[in-house]
Image (cartoon, rainbow, N blue to C red):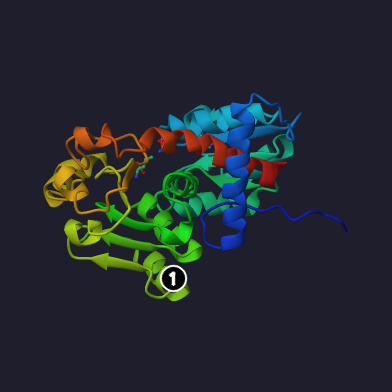
Amino acid sequence: TDAKQKRDFLSLDGWSKQELLGLLERARELKELRRLGERHQPLAGKSVGLVFEKASTRTRVSFSVGAFELGAQALDLPVAQTQLGRGEPIPDAARVLSRYVHGLVIRTFAHERLEEFARWSSVPVINGLTDLHHPCQILADVQTAMERLGAVEDLEVAWIGDGNNVAHSWIEAASILGFRLRLACPEGYGPDAAVLAAAQARAPGLVSCVGSPEEAARGANVLTTDVWASMGQEEEAKVRAAAFAGFKIDRQLLSLATSEAIVLHCLPAHRGEEIDEGVLEGPSSAVFDEAENRLHVQKALLELLVG
Ligand code: CP
Ligand code: NVA
């Protein structure tokens, strides 16, 4: 048969450096086409379902607008308003939705739920964030860093704070794309051991956990962080705030980085907790370019997987 094998984007694992750089280059081109106001609709007549089990501003709107600009319609499917929210099994929902739409973006809690969706879906599934990974975010982050700093191999990234979903996708990105990443996380809040071990096996010496934010930041050209309590951890917020004292990106930490260093944050941010207002709004901050680039990289992804 000539049945085409669909491809998913659940994490960066399984994607080659060449493929990821191809997506980033396409994102750059699509950004330019958009700036010129040129129409490009390879997804005309198609539909993309956005199955979201958590709140979202950037991911939901950038996928929705991105699909529209490529000629497709996006369907907002907050889980609570579908039968999934009343207990319909994922294998049923995935097979049914696959009969209607040409691609699915899923935001959920356990990464296994996303994997189950992908297993039962006959159309491409894209990770719009799980508790374990946020790969679309890191595509946009790397695009932003390359716009500001140049070749991907020259990036030297410091992750300050929680070893969370965003950190895990940074870890995979560093080990695939070949740049250095130092993570400084409070004790007990480091990254997932399996994700870290896989990256260290893939690219020995590139990814390391260090003892302090200062050690991570010294000589880096990208400083990045994220909230201390992610979605689903709201009840831990107080305990975490105490554990994360000192793990903040402020002017002093930024002064240890190179003079051209940029600051990234996936947003939303908690000013005064993981990042200072002055840094977030200061000249080194690239957070709004970073948010914009979600649109361009995800259009590149939709074009490749759904087009
Ligand atoms: N950064 C990010 O994914 O933002 P949203 O939660 O608003 O989608
Ligand atoms: N780590 C955060 C990222 C939000 C975009 C969360 O999972 O809530």
Residue hosting label 1: 198
Vertical side of 16 occupied by 304: above or below: above
Q: Where is residue 300 in the image (x, y as percent from the top left)?
A: 62, 42
Q: Where is residue 47 in the image (x, y as percent from the top left)?
A: 69, 32
Q: Is residue 69 left or right of residue 294?
A: right
Q: Residue at x 24, y 56 (%)?
A: 217
Viewer-side residue, 88 vs 70: 70
Q: In this view, does 16 lie to the left or right of 155?
A: right
Q: Which residue lies furthest to the front in this view?
A: 259
Q: Where is residue 129 in the image (x, y as percent from the top left)?
A: 45, 44
Q: Which kind of residue does numbered mark 1 sit on? A: Ala
Dot 1 falls on a residue whose secondary structure is helix
Q: Which residue is drawn at 73% across and 31% down?
A: 41
User: In what quadrant of the picture does the N terminus appear?
Assistant: bottom right
* Residue 108 at least partly seen: yes
Vertical side of 45 occupied by 219: above or below: below
Q: In this view, does 236 lie to the left or right of 159?
A: left
Viewer-side residue, 241 vs 278: 278
* Residue 15 at least partly seen: no
Vertical side of 217 occupied by 74: above or below: above
Q: Which residue is drawn at 50% across and 62% down?
A: 177
Give the crowd class for mark 1: few <14, some 14-19, many >=20 residues within 10 Å: some
